[in-house]
């Protein structure tokens, strides 16, 4: 009987080891992929303007004439200063998209892979202070997501895994006082919750 129980214990220990190793491998793979550069070697070095009459957006895909567009799309302000420049492949955002304030300063930079959020997305307030710094993996929030007030004071630091809250979630009022400070374990929140979470780029598109 004791030998049987010991065998069962070894079996469950073995299963747990496999599960833990599998999770660790998954996280390592995600971490590796998040920071690898999207391959844009197939994007031709041609640029057209956003208001080009031959450029059409249909069902989320840009066409130039009758074909899905590959290349760069540029938009300018009325003053002719650059407003945005985005990389496209087969009609979908692929690579880096940048937008600028009218004074020429970078407003935000986002990265895409075959039309979905992939990698780092970050932006600035017009005064040059950081506004947000997010990470996406296959269009899902992954890792720490940060935001700041226009003054430069931290607004929130949220941890995500596979687009769900996981780990410590913190947010502060502009005077530095915390109003969110809780931990999420297995979908359950533990700690201080006084307000809604800060916004993310989810469902925001440049198109």
Image: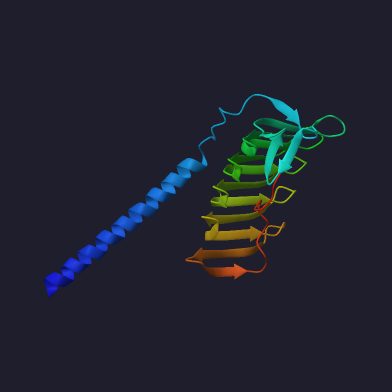
Compare residues 78 and 93 and report the one nearer the observer.
93
Compare residues 51 and 36 and report the one nearer the observer.
51
Q: Residue furthest bottom?
A: 1
The N terminus, quarter of image: bottom left
Q: Quadrant of residue 8?
A: bottom left
| Rendered image coloring scheme | rainbow
Give the percent coordinates (x, y) of residue 82: 78, 31
Q: Residue furthest top?
A: 45
Q: Residue furthest right?
A: 78
Q: Is residue 141 above or below residue 68?
A: below
The residue located at (53%, 34%) in the rendering is: 37
Give the percent coordinates (x, y) of residue 18: 30, 56
Q: Quadrant of residue 96?
A: top right
Residue 129 seen by the camera: no
The residue located at (72%, 56%) in the rendering is: 174
Q: Is residue 81 left or right of residue 111?
A: right
The residue located at (28%, 60%) in the rendering is: 15
Compare residues 193 and 139 and report the one nearer the observer.
139
The C terminus, quarter of image: top right
Give the percent coordinates (x, y) of residue 198: 67, 58
Q: Quadrant of residue 159?
A: bottom right
The residue located at (56%, 65%) in the rendering is: 182
Residue 155 seen by the camera: yes
Q: Residue furthest front?
A: 66
Give the percent coordinates (x, y) of residue 125: 74, 44
Total residue callouts: 0
Compare residues 10 and 89 and report the one nearer the observer.
89
């Amino acid at each position: 009987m004791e030998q049987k129980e010991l065998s069962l214990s070894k079996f469950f220990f073995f299963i747990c080891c496999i599960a833990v190793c599998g999770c660790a491998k998954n996280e390592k793979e995600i971490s590796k992929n998040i920071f690898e550069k999207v391959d844009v070697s197939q994007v031709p070095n041609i640029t057209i303007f956003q208001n080009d009459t031959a450029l059409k957006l249909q069902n989320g895909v840009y066409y130039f004439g009758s074909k899905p567009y590959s290349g760069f799309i540029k938009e300018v302000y009325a003053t002719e200063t650059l407003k945005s420049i985005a990389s496209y492949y087969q009609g979908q955002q692929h690579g880096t998209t940048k937008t600028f304030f009218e004074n020429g300063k970078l407003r935000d930079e986002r990265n895409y892979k075959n039309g979905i959020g992939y990698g780092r997305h970050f932006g600035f307030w017009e005064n040059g202070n950081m506004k947000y710094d997010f990470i996406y993996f296959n269009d899902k929030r992954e890792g720490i997501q940060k935001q700041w007030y226009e003054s430069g004071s931290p607004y929130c630091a949220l941890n995500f895994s596979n687009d769900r809250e996981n780990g410590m979630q913190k947010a502060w009022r502009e005077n530095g006082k915390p109003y969110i400070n809780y931990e999420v374990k297995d979908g359950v929140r533990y700690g201080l919750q006084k307000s809604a979470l800060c916004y993310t780029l989810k469902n925001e598109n440049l198109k």
